[in-house]
Each structure stands twice: as C-alpha cells, then as structure tokens.
Amino acid sequence: MYKAVIFDMDGTILNTIGDLTNAINYALAEMGKKHDFPEEKVKLCFGCGIDADMEKALAMEAGCPDEDLEYIGSSIPFSRYHFTKEDVQNLKSLFVPRYTAHCHEKTAPYEGIPEVLSALRKQGILTAVASNKDDRDVQTLTRVLFPRLFDQAMGNHKEIRRKPAPDMVMAILKNLHVSQKEACYIGDSEVDMETARNSGIPCISVDWGFRTRSFLLAHGADCIVSSPKELLPLLMK
C-alpha cells in the first residue's frame, strides 16, 4: 500500500473545462479573435503551464489541427500560425484575471473522486495535489471543493519549475516525509506521465479528463483507469 498519492488537478480530480473555456473565449474575444471554441477543443490546449497553454490557444484560434497542438512552441514554431511572444503575454494578461475571478462557477469534482480521497485518508494514506495551474487558483479550489481532503496542494509559482520537471512532486514528498518508492502519481495527460517518470514514481493515467485513452496509449501510458472506483484497489494493494 502506498503511503502517499499525488494527484494532478485539471482533468483528474476536477472538471475545470467549463470555466477554462469561458475564460479563454473571453480573452480571445478581447483580442478581437475568434472566440466560440467548444470544450472538447479547448481541453487540448491546457495542462502544460500557462504560457504553453496560451500558445496552444492562439494556435487553435489560427486553425492548428488538434493533433499538432501539443507540438506548438517546440517542433512547430509560432511563426507557422502568425503569432508572437507578445501575443502570448497579451492573451495571458486577459485570461488569468478572468479565470481567477470565475474559476469555480462551473468547476466540480469528478463523480467518485471525493469518496476515493476519503477512503485513502481513512487508510492513513497521505494525499496531495501537484498542478501547473496557478498556485493561487489551486489553493482556492482545494479549499472550496475539497475541504480537509488534501494534506498538501501545490500549484505553479515562480519559485519552482512547473511539471514535467520533478521539482513540485519532489518538494511534496519531502514535505510529507515520504520516499519515491512509497508514492504514486495520478494524472490525465502526457505531461503527467512525464512528470512521474522524471520523479521516479509510478503513474496511473485516467481517461475521463483532457486526453483520450487512445492519446494516452500512444504516449506510453502503463496503466489507465476509466473510473475513480478503479483507483482504490490499485492504490491499496
């Protein structure tokens, strides 16, 4: 049985896509761009950290195919879709305050997640959140939607490298006094799988979030679950 379980937030424990979609469409509209993107499209843009998320949103708006969004800013340059670093920062400056002000209007835990967290805690298993979402929003959402269900929550802030760097996970393990071999990581994206690998801990992927099962398999997922109730046997064995 693991001593600690670290969860990603967006797409793993919380369905945040409604509020993210509203905020990104608002920000795009303020920039005079197309702004009627559906949730299924927007979810492909989020999970890699705020700057990368904004880059993907601008590429999406410019017509980037879904399958190429993960490569924006790395193997696919901004220039292909005719936006600049200044555009990215402008979109971020519009998105961040809008999202922070409205981050839990539509957001809710996925069905079954609170019960899983309660069961883990009853068994003495420590629980934590590691998210690339802004730390201010992470603290708000865990406090409002998961009262007393997490031992620690950590979001993106300037003092620590964002996922997939292992820094956030390693800091949480240190604070909880748990070794890598005693912990497990749970997430819904390619970033989460890479984070777990970089941290030297096993990863359980979930397919109810921002990435499909086929996407997760194509990116090397070792273990995928399709409902929260499938987690407990894996975490308590």
Image (cartoon, rainbow, N blue to C red):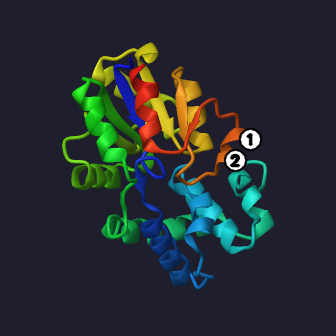
**Image position of 130 with respect to 67: above or below:** above
Q: Does 178 sit left or right of 211 as displayed?
A: left
| Type of amino acid under label 2 | Phe
Q: Which mark is residue 218?
A: 1
Instruction: State the CA–CA distance, disc 1 to disc 2.
Output: 5 Å
Residue drawn at (24%, 23%), measured in percent from left and top? 124
Q: Are marks 1 and 2 in contact (CB under 8 Å)?
A: yes
The C terminus lies in quadrant: top left
Residue at 64% x, 68% y: name it.
Answer: 58
Q: Is residue 231 visible?
A: yes
Residue 96 lies, in percent from the top left, at: 42, 65
| Residue 85 visible to an observer of this rendering | no
- At label 1, counting other C-alpha atoms closer than 10 Å, the crowd grade (few under 14, some 14-19, many 20 or more) is few
Number of marks drawn: 2
Residue drawn at the location 36% of the way across and 46% of the way down: 113
Residue 13 placement (x, y as % from top left): 40, 48
At 64% from the left and 61% from the top, the residue drawn is: 56
* Residue 178 sits in quarter: top left
Q: Examine the image and state in which quarter residue 106 appears.
A: bottom left
In the displayed orientation, state which residue is furthest to the left: 148
Kind of element beneath mark 2: helix
| Mark sitting on residue 63 | none
The quadrant of the picture occupied by the N terminus is top left
Up the image or down, 216 lies above or below 84; here it is: above
Relative to residue 122, is residue 132 depicted above or below? below
Residue 132 horizontal/vertical position (percent) = 46, 47
Percent of width and height locating residue 173: 36, 23
Q: Secondary structure at mark 1?
A: helix
Q: Which residue is mark 2?
A: 215
Kind of residue at disc 1? Ala
In the image, taking residue 108 as reference, residue 169 lies left or right, namely right
